[in-house]
Amino acid sequence: MHSPSTSPDADARRSDVRSIAKRYHRVERGVGWLVALAAAGTLLVAFALTDLVPALAAAAALVVAFRAPILRRSGTTRLRTDAAPEAAVEEFASATPPVLAFQWGTADAVRPTSDGADPTYEHSALLGLRTYSLTVETEVDETRDADETGEGDAVAGADDGTGSPVARVRIEGTLDGEPWAAYSVAIRRAGDGEPGETVVDVELLPRRRFGLRSVPQALVTDAYYVDVFAVQGYEVVDRDVSFGI
């Protein structure tokens, strides 16, 4: 497993990420089509077996169930890498942070930062252009409590043998100008381990609600999650991310 700081070629790492991300995207689209076809089949059966009014009611209920924003996705992930904490901080505070590999890895273009502008991932879709604008903020303060803003409790640094964070990176994402998701990242030395060993605790902070149609996409993401981090030099030690109301 290559570490972020010792990877022989950063471009090769990004190429590996994009390869996995594109496989994920193909599978995710396929699953999306299967779900849509299953829903359409269910509606056709309803229309064939019942009167028009009950069938229309079933169709409306199905649309609401799939599209109504009733779910939030949150949780924590612990990563480990052989890279020094400073190298991990640099990567998570970059325009292409490891935790957003599926986003920048499938983007048609990553608009580079300039004059302090935020990095933007541009995706083309059937209905036009979608833009992901991600704001990255890095804070280096070993004594700062992670929950000053009421968030980041899960990565505040439990008494589990790891050292105090050398930095906290906060990543805020917006989709077409609307809140999308945020990540609170605590980067620390791996306890009394060898110099360079680093633990990265990532907390997913929900910024919007999703419909049931997002659940299959999340399952596909989980299937590729370990691989996309491995090619970036990170081992997934623990992960507890789920949907909630």
Image (tube, rainbow, N blue to C red):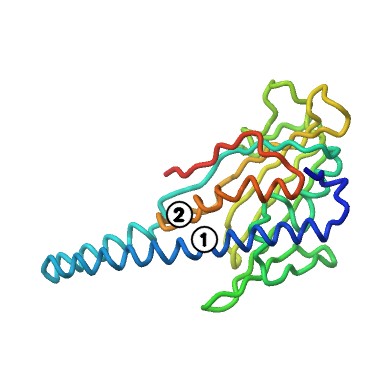
Q: Left of 48 or right of it: where is 241?
A: right
The number of numbered badges drawn on the structure is 2
The residue nearer to you, when weighing 35 against 12, is 12
Contact (Cβ within 8 Å) of mark 2 with mark 1: yes
Residue depicted at 46% across the width and 56% down the height:
214
- Which residue was labeled with disc 2? 216
**Residue projecting furthest to the left:** 51
The label on residue 28 is 1
Q: Secondary structure at mark 2?
A: helix
Given the image, on which type of amino acid does mark 2 rest? Pro
Q: Quadrant of the C terminus?
A: top left
Given the image, on which type of amino acid does mark 1 rest? Glu
When asked about the image quadrant of residue 38, the answer is bottom left
The residue nearer to you, when weighing 241 against 224, is 224
Picture coordinates of residue 94 (x, y %)? 79, 54
Mark 2: give few (<14), some (14-19) or many (20+) Cα within 10 Å: some
Q: Left of 152 or right of it: where is 115?
A: right
Query: Vertically, is 66 above or below 165?
Result: below
Whichever of callouts 2 and 1 sits on the residue coming sooner in the sequence is: 1
Picture coordinates of residue 62 (x, y %)? 29, 61
Q: Secondary structure at mark 1?
A: helix
Q: Left of 137 or right of it: where is 174?
A: left
Residue depicted at 72% across the width and 50% down the height:
98
Query: Vertically, is 121 above or below 205?
Result: below
Q: Quadrant of the N terminus?
A: top right
**What distance separates the C-alpha of mark 2 from that of mark 1?**
8 Å
